[in-house]
Image (cartoon, rainbow, N blue to C red):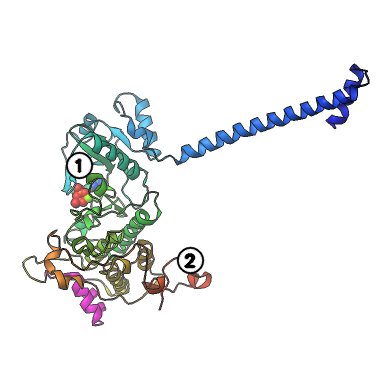
């Protein structure tokens, strides 16, 4: 069209013998110029789009965590910004003065654990908090790692994980500021007679906890091993929903303590997996599955797994559950724990899940997403093999203190491999939906 029109226009202006040739050349130049402009625009657009993509993927510490909120009491603008950051799930950096003011000069102690002391407090807008003052050495290098870990923990958000609002890092103190959990920690309900939770609620708590850990292991951006699953780290909100606390803390407080190091004992005796003591398997997220199994036993028994520290057997509940299960007396055992007949089947099921979780070999333990399914009840649980064989070689003392026992025969297993033939074997899919549409997951029985 253009090539037809242009020669007409030009033919009126230059009425020479060469006007056709000239017009042809001009048309070519014009077409090339248009093509060049289109090319340049496309290039610029592509550049803009790709730079946005890169920004979205940058693993940076959230901007807000690098700045200090000036003074939350002064200026509504700052307060608004702070609330905006919290809503956007960014951990906020607080000053030591702010921390002191939030906790009313550290006046209400909620408890203390391996990583520090926890104080109750509240933000100026009335939102309640729990501030954990960490026992950690403070220097520039540690500070950089602290920031990186805060970035990870602060971006890890799930309904069954305790929310990190912010932190404080100063020459004298490092602290983490969490959402306050109205009903405290699960240990209070399991190990005292005064506060009682019904079985139904306990099952909910177990499933919620399993979901929180499954998220840490299998779903969140940066996979996190908790290393310290136990009732004191399961917190309960106003509705008694479970939220896992202290995830990411092991790494935050021991940045150099990787699982390869020789001093690598982690967690709490009685809950930590045998591979920490025996060094017969590499440490993987399956160490949390073991600890979760120990927690399930404590939910079933409503007692500490080890009670009598003076005796050789420690009156150890998990072993009792296995012995009764082996004899076909599991029902009597759970009823003997005060569980009502109505809840017996669920309690037996939970016992089977617990026995799977505490298998000696990490690979034999199910992944947490399978544990969730097993607890929820839509699948038929396959008979667990005998656990606790390791205790025959090292004795019950291993459950008391964090001693390290080196086993000469080291059996290294690679993470992710499963039962013989690569199949998993913890349960059989039995729900009608799964039967209809086929098992999409990884845990289908090989039996
Ligand atoms: N976010 C929180 N809300 C309410 N109470 C908490 C919170 N975090 C911790 N606590 C209480 O403080 C106690 C000590 O916590 P912690 O220092 O993590 O030690 P541990 O987990 O070893 O018991 C917990 O057992 C719990 O009762
Ligand atoms: Mg804790």
Q: Name the residue: 11% across, 71% down.
A: 313
Residue 390: % across, % down = 19, 70
> Looking at this view, is 33 or 293 the one in front?
33
Question: Mark 1 falls on what kind of element?
Answer: strand
Numbered mark located on residue 444 in the image: none
Q: Name the residue: 32% across, 69% down.
A: 364
- Residue 337 seen by the camera: no
Residue 39: % across, % down = 67, 33
Q: In this view, does 148 lie above or below 343?
A: above
The residue segment tinted magenta is 314-338
Residue 319 on the magenta segment: yes
Q: Is the magenta stretch mostly helix, strand or loop?
A: helix
The residue singled out by tag 2 in the image is 440
Q: Examine the image and state in which quarter residue 198 appears.
A: bottom left
Q: Is residue 162 above or below residue 322?
A: above
Q: Is residue 129 left or right of residue 45?
A: left
> Looking at this view, is 349 or 218 the one in front?
218
> Looking at this view, is 399 or 76 the one in front?
399
The residue singled out by tag 1 in the image is 134
Total count of labels? 2
Q: Examine the image and state in which quarter residue 392 appears.
A: bottom left
Question: How far is the residue under mark 2 from the one under mark 1?
Answer: 43 Å
Question: Mark 2 falls on what kind of element?
Answer: loop
Residue 345: % across, % down = 32, 74
Mark 2 vs 1, N-terminal side: 1
Residue 312 on the magenta segment: no
């Amino acid at each position: 069209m253009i090539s037809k029109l242009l020669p007409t226009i030009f033919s009126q202006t230059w009425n020479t013998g060469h006007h056709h040739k000239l017009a042809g050349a001009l048309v070519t130049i014009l077409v090339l110029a248009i093509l060049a402009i289109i090319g340049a625009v496309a290039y610029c657009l592509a550049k803009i789009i790709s730079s946005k993509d890169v920004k979205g993927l940058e693993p940076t510490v959230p901007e807000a965590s690098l700045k200090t909120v000036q003074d939350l009491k002064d200026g509504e603008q700052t307060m608004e910004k702070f609330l905006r950051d919290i809503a956007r799930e960014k951990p906020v950096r607080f000053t030591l003065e702010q921390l002191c003011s939030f906790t009313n000069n550290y006046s209400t102690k909620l408890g203390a654990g391996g990583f520090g002391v926890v104080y109750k407090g509240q933000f100026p807008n009335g939102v309640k908090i729990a501030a954990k003052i960490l026992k950690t050495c403070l220097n520039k290098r540690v500070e950089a790692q602290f920031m990186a870990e805060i970035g990870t923990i602060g971006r890890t958000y799930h309904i069954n994980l305790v929310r990190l609002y912010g932190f404080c890092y100063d020459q004298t103190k490092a602290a983490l500021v969490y959402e306050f959990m109205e009903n405290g920690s699960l240990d209070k309900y399991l190990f005292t007679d005064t506060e009682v939770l019904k079985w139904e609620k306990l099952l909910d708590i177990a499933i919620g906890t399993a979901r929180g850990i499954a998220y840490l292991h299998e779903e969140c951006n940066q996979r996190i091993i908790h290393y310290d699953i136990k009732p004191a780290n399961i917190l309960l909100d106003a509705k008694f929903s479970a939220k896992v606390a202290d995830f990411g803390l092991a790494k935050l407080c021991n940045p150099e303590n990787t699982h390869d190091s020789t001093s690598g004992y982690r967690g709490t005796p009685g809950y930590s997996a045998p591979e920490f003591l025996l060094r017969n398997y590499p440490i993987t997220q399956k160490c949390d599955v073991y600890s979760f199994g120990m927690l399930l036993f404590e939910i079933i028994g409503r007692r500490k797994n080890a009670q009598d520290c003076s005796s050789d057997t420690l009156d150890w509940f998990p072993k009792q559950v296995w012995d009764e299960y082996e004899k076909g007396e599991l029902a009597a055992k759970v009823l003997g724990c005060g569980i009502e007949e109505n809840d017996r089947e669920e309690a037996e099921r939970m016992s089977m899940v617990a026995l799977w979780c505490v298998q000696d070999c990490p690979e034999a333990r199910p992944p947490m997403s399978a544990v969730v399914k097993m607890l929820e009840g839509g699948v038929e649980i396959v008979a667990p093999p005998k656990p606790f064989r390791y205790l025959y070689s090292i004795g019950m003392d291993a459950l008391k203190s964090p001693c390290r026992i080196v086993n000469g025969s080291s059996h290294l297993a690679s993470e992710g491999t499963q039962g013989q033939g690569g199949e998993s074997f913890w349960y059989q899919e039995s729900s009608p939906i799964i039967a209809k549409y086929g098992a999409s997951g990884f845990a289908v029985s090989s039996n």
